[in-house]
Image: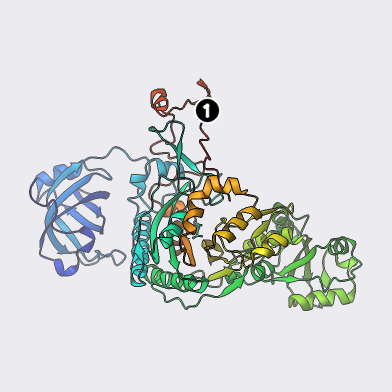
Amino acid sequence: MGEPVRSDRAGELRASDAGREVRLAGWVASRRDLGGVVFLVLRDASGEAQVVVDPQAVPAAGEVAKDLRDEYCITVSGTVRPRPDGTVNPGMATGEIEVAAADVRVLSPSDPLPFQIDDRADVDEVRRLQWRYLDLRRPRMKANLIARSRAVSAMRRSMEGQGFLEVETPTLIRSTPEGARDMLVPSRLRAGSFYALPQSPQLFKQLLMIGGVERYYQIARCYRDEDFRSDRQLEFAQLDLEGAFWGRDDVLATLESVMVEVARELRGVELSTPFPRLTYREAMARYGTDKPDVRLGMEICDLGGAFAGTGFKAFAGVLDAGGVVRGINAGPLGMGRSGLDALGDLAKGAGAKGLAWLVVEDDGSLRSPIAKFLGDDEAAAVKEAMGAGPGDTLLLVADTPEIAAPALDRVRRHLGEPDDPDELAFLWVIDFPVFEKAPDGSLAPAHHPFTSPHDVDEMGSDPEHALSHAYDLVLNGSELGSGSVRIHDPEVQRRVFEILGISDEEAESRFGWFLEALRYGTPPHAGFAVGIDRLVSILQGEPNIREVIPFPKTQTGADPLTKAPTPVAADQLAELGLEAAGEDADGVAGGDGAAGEGGGASAG
Ligand code: ASP
């Protein structure tokens, strides 16, 4: 067992290796028996090479080759030779050569496969995850793992080049509020008490700034117990960073350098910087979302002016009530009634009462179920506002701004297609409001409570309009991450808690340790976190983040491979001072003082 199992990597053999004796090791990617001569494709991590076993020349190897099946793990010794004329495969990196086998050995056989190891096979995702180790043998998954590793190493390179120190923060912590539910870990030594897994290293990175680490970064693993939306995981990785004596523009410039490095590494492109910036208000007005895909065109127009004083009751009522009429010029859609109705259903799915459509005819007149309600001036004003010409379809929503925005965003995303699908449209959205307004009009804090408001007085007196020094990075319509300038003045922090409805007592009991730290000469500081899964999936052109996570959970938070999460034995629970709730138990989980003293509920 002392000698190396192989001399060469299969995918690296070239015509210049012809004549060399090599020993390869890998998996049987395919096996064809052509009248006794066996052709194998041998795959290892570097790629694939063709192996030819001629039983007449090497009877013992022929015997072994006869019984090989897909995905057997084998070694092959033999001689590299040019492929015969007419059999060169230009689609394969090693397509000019083959290895004439002298010896073939099975290192480890394989059971029959649950699915073909082939990018073209369309396999149900749960099956792929149940046999993820086989799924990872597919070229696409291997490419994704490599891309992820290269992205992370480009991040480290960039951060280190910019003078950042990598610091690890703990993952068994008291809860760090980020607005989601914490994942809890019971303590055995202090039964009835719990750690939380970090939703982010937020407060630790702020402590590092107080600790004099002026430039911090970490590839941080974070946990958020959220109800699964299509593209979320319970645990995820982010590039987390923070800088002292910093303002927003330092953060943005630093992140731009990181993105330049990562895009160069994965896509071989040079991004131009600085990235465009939109304020939150501009983004909502022009795209109906705080994560616009600016590649799609079709900006939203406000038609309040065009419909001022309209006789069309439906619109007049909305405008009188303080609502908006907004729309997009979808261009020459050429859609029939049923297509337009389907767009209406999309808008309704986002809460709108409907979607009005108008098609500009060749003579400039408007064809639409609502055309008869519109005066000539109005029709002209709408066309003018939307830059509409013959053939264009105009799609309008009349509602509150909170409903019109997501409805039009949805329609726009559905219809839009980037001219160049490879384009990387990075942009910053800055100046987020302190509070976000739900469709029912209620206000909730938009960020974690350590985010600096523009003006803490305004935050109290005019919450609806108050802005914060918070910003997001957006790529092709997806949010990659967010950050902010932090509060470094303990008095401002106290007032922000108060305005967020966190009383002094509550703040003291939950964050007293942090408020105290702020009182020891805290430098102004700011930071950011970028989701690595999301970034890599977009750069790899993958439709969801699970494709770039080696062992992801399903949409319901399960791992089909290990079957986690599972119940645990009663004695394991007893040791932790817990009892299981559920069909087999009548106790209540964590009933034994589970909340603990000042427990870790989130402040988000
Ligand atoms: N802690 C925030 C997050 O994880 C990012 C930040 O504000 O730095 O989203």
Q: Quadrant of residue 241?
A: bottom left
Amino acid type at circle 1 is Gly
Can you give x and y, in whole percent of width and height, for residue 365 in the image? 83, 74
Q: Quadrant of residue 294?
A: bottom right
Q: Nearer the viewer, residue 404 or 100?
A: 404
Q: Residue furthest left?
A: 2
Above or below: residue 198 compared with residue 184: below
Q: Which residue is mark 1?
A: 591
Q: Residue furthest right?
A: 311
- Look at 46% across and 61% down and name the residue there: 530
Above or below: residue 22 compared with residue 104: below
Q: Is residue 287 left or right of residue 354?
A: left
Can you give x and y, in whole percent of width and height, for residue 436 in the image? 66, 58
Can you give x and y, in whole percent of width and height, for residue 511 in the image? 52, 49
Q: Nearer the viewer, residue 496 or 303?
A: 496
Can you see residue 476? no
Q: Is residue 149 left or right of residue 191?
A: left
Q: Is residue 604 left or right of residue 144?
A: right
Q: Nearer the viewer, residue 115 or 35?
A: 115
- For the N terminus, which image quadrant? top left
Q: Secondary structure at mark 1?
A: loop
Above or below: residue 598 compared with residue 336: above
- Look at 21% across and 67% down and name the residue there: 85
Can you see residue 393? yes
Q: Nearer the viewer, residue 592 or 290?
A: 592
- Look at 76% across and 71% down and name the residue there: 302
Can you give x and y, in whole percent of width and height, for residue 362 in the image? 78, 77
Q: Is residue 66 left or right of residue 413?
A: left
